[in-house]
Image (cartoon, rainbow, N blue to C red):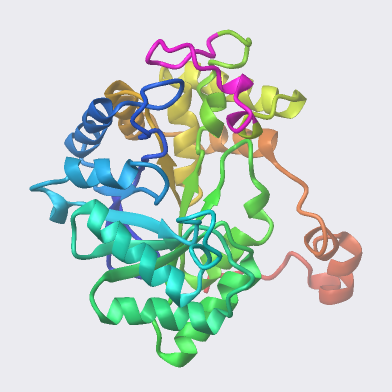
Amino acid sequence: MRYKLLGRSGLRVSALCLGTMTFDGTGGGWCVSEKEGRGIVDAFLDAGGNFLDTHTYGPTEDYLGGYLTGRRDRVVLSTKFGGTLAADDVNASGAHRKSLVRSVESSLRRLRTDYLDLLWLHAWDPLTPTEELMRATDDLVRRGKVLYLGVANAPAWAVAHAVTLADQRGWTPFVAVQVEYSLVERDVDREILPMAHSLGLGVTAWTPLASGWLTGKYLSGGDTAGSNGSGGRRLDDPVMSRFLPRNDRTVEIGREVCRIAEENECPPAHVALNWLRRRGAIPLFGATSPEQVRQNAACFDSLLSAEQADRLDAVSRIRLGFPHDFLNSGLVRRLMYGEHAGLVDVVSR
């Protein structure tokens, strides 16, 4: 396992993060039982992983708290807030102070801990003023209940505003963003990633394997059964099928991933995970078996060459749109820089 600093903090996290979306306790479809979940966490810790991500839905926090008994302090434990805790309670969701405090106190009880290493806002809440969000989360940090803050699934302008506001007021800023990012889904290349790099924020990427598409097993329309033999089919699942867009572009991306995997004599998943790592992201993956964890954790043994990374960039590239395409056009570059366009050496700052 490799490790890296999370954003502009000194927190050391493993270069892979284990997500717990599959820990629903049913053992059906793409989910696992409580016993199977323990084996998955054990395999991740045995591989040197220390970065665990969970959420407030279902029994996942309860399970994870039990799994970590006696070894809580060796992990970087993150959970989320903002999602609804009670559908019939108007204040049981959102990023406002009442929802935040209620959610964190509940998570601490379920996880059987007195502090959270990292607290994510699960999705941007446009109804809550940014000042309230950042002051309320800062209060939890000052009370020692939360150590670091992050934000998931938020527009770049909102994150930049929140970080700048916190810096100006002396409050605790976000140290990382959590986004959907993979060779199949690269929308964050437009605004969110440049913003994160500019502000020194860490990036964790959920669905790094595009819900299994980048493992190659869906290319032929063949193996769509869950690894536990339950017969769950992601392509037919109304929720998961949203993350498995099958079209000419995604098929060609999958084929290129498989070609490079053959060249490197490694699983296709290693190719997809290492492409993200080369772009500075921490892949956040889920698993339905300890073997999947061990296989993904071995990705550091099969790195990409620069030429292979370029091929993956090319096959998966998206159009950035305005203003990026406009600013990169020859006409605008000549208007801005005259005959010196392309002659100035740029150093990252």
**Which of the 4 image quarters holds residue 143?**
bottom left
* Residue at image coords 21%, 47%: 65
Depth order, front residue of 213/269: 213
The stretch in magenta equals 223-241
Q: On the rendered structure, is 193 left or right of 67?
A: right
Depth order, front residue of 307/271: 271
**Which of the 4 image quarters holds residue 31?**
top left
* Residue at image coords 70%, 41%: 317
Answer above or below: position of 78 versus 342.
above
What percent of the width, then of the height, locates residue 232?
50, 17
What percent of the width, then of the height, locates residue 137?
40, 76
What percent of the width, then of the height, locates residue 264?
44, 21
Q: Is residue 172 magenta?
A: no
* Residue 1 visible, this angle: no
Q: Is residue 226 magenta?
A: yes
* Residue 325 visible, this angle: yes
Depth order, front residue of 236/330: 236
Q: On the rendered structure, is 45 left or right of 286?
A: left
Answer above or below: position of 230 versus 338.
above
